[in-house]
Amino acid sequence: MALSHILWRYVREERLKGISLVLSHVHHGVRKESDDEERMVQKMAAEWETPCIIHRFDSKAYAKARGQSFQEAAREWRYARWKEDMRKEGCTLLATAHHLGDQAETILYRLLRGSGTAGLAGIYPAKGSTIRPLLTFSKADILNYCKREALPYALDRSNEEPVYVRNRIRLELLPELERDYNPRIQEALGRTGELLRWDEEYITQQVEVAWKNYHLEGSDDEIGLKRNVFTEPAAILSRLLRRAAMLVTHEPRGLGFDYVAKIMDFQGKAGWAQDLPGMRVKITEEGVWFSAYADSVKSKVVATSGKQITNLPFSEISMDIGVWYEFTSLKMEIGLLGESEYYSANGSFDERENRVAVFSKDLLGKFSERMVFRTRRQGDRMWFRGVGHKSIKKVFQEENIPVMLRNRLPLMACENEVLWIPGVRQSDLCRSGQNTEKVYGIVKSQAWGSNLNSL
């Protein structure tokens, strides 16, 4: 509301510049207050005689269909609609109201995850056609502006719930840093982001030049870099390797630090090869090659409708009870079934085998919105009663899972907390008790248990 008012004033005060303003509001269909907020936006737009576009969609259903987390899917949908609005309305810029608090949260969040300069540069004040005019102003500044200008506004109550990591950073970590370490921590983090952005912009220019020098054309699912790329300094080499991996896997988060370091450690030694998440990397006399796996997953609903869900790339897939997921390259099907579905499907499964995991429905429900199937990532861990957390690597070692298979196995996880490695081991975090409603995780595979290496 503050940003809209500021831009509306600017358009009026600078009429000779011929600037026009269009408001675009998204109703996510989640909170009961959203209807009132929509009406508030429409009322202000009418008073300002400014065009206002309203978008409504079922964000949670969209997230499930896309196999993404709610926040990630909703953001993707919003920006897609805004791009359409810009095209239809003839707009050249998209203005969003990110502020200094958002910047501080983003930088802290990425710092805790071990990001490099690209991540720690934070949110850009201007990138492409997107501008963020309020990025250097605090939330308090913005609320004071609303009060001074008698602007109505709404606060999203879900932002005050310490459910997501970002919310806990905002509600717990930042206040503690302000109180005990630096009362101006937000400004300090904003300044750090700006300094690192300068560095990152320069390095990005150098990477573009290097890419043109080293890039090799391969097949449709293969990208290569000339072998002498390993003579480049680590800052450039690591970015070239991550870029090649991203183009092959289409995974925007790129290749993790440990995997990049592993490739760099071999310094271009011909004959080296390694299976990594979603791809195979090999070094030949010609160069280093990144090849995509043909792995895909299909899901089938165990319901009377028999509805087929479209094929999805196996990167991260949201999970639902009552659904079978078929991993074609692993010759494996995984189902997550309620008690009635489990016994009607096949009540003869032996719960003592690793092929069946038994969860408490209530405990599992606490993770349900963020629970996904995916392959392993750095920092993954499992919790066991009387032991505590173990790394996924340690669990794989204890279970004698072949190294070449570890990066291909689907995991049932919530962020870095792995609840189940189908067919291998179940965490004790959501394990069912005797008197609780159960959810069954089932693995069906011809090869499982007989010859893992054949997978």
Image (cartoon, rainbow, N blue to C red):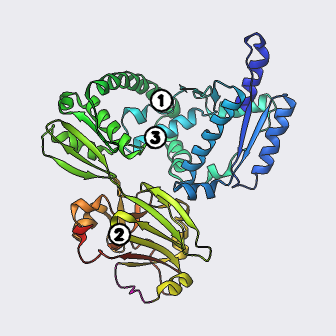
Crowding near the residue tagged with mark 3, few <14, some 14–19, many ≥20 C-alpha atoms within 10 Å = many
Q: Nearer the viewer, mark 2 or mark 1?
A: 2
> Circles 1 and 3: CB distance less than 8 Å?
no
Q: Which residue is mark 2?
A: 331
Query: In this view of the protein, can residue 437 be seen by the observer?
Result: no
Q: Which residue is drawn at the image coordinates 56% and 37% (left, top)?
A: 102
**Badge nearest the viewer, 1 or 3:** 3
**Which mark is first along the chain, 3 or 1?**
3
Sequence-earlier tag: 2 or 1: 1
* Stretch in magenta: 348-354
Residue 254 pos. (x, y %): 37, 43
Give, as a three-letter code, the residue at label 2.
Lys
* Upstream in sequence: badge 3 or badge 2: 3
Q: Residues within 10 Å of mark 1 (few under 14, many from 20)?
A: few
Q: Secondary structure at mark 1?
A: helix
Q: Is residue 272 above or below residue 356?
A: above
Quarter of the figure that contains the N terminus: top right
Q: Which residue is mark 3?
A: 108
Residue extending farthest bottom: 348
The residue that mark 1 highlights is 188
Residue 318 versus residue 346: which sits nearer the camera? 346
- Image coordinates of residue 46 in percent, x first then y, are 86, 33
**Circle 3 or circle 2, nearest the eye:** 2
Residue 244 in the image, given as x and y percentages of width and height: 32, 38
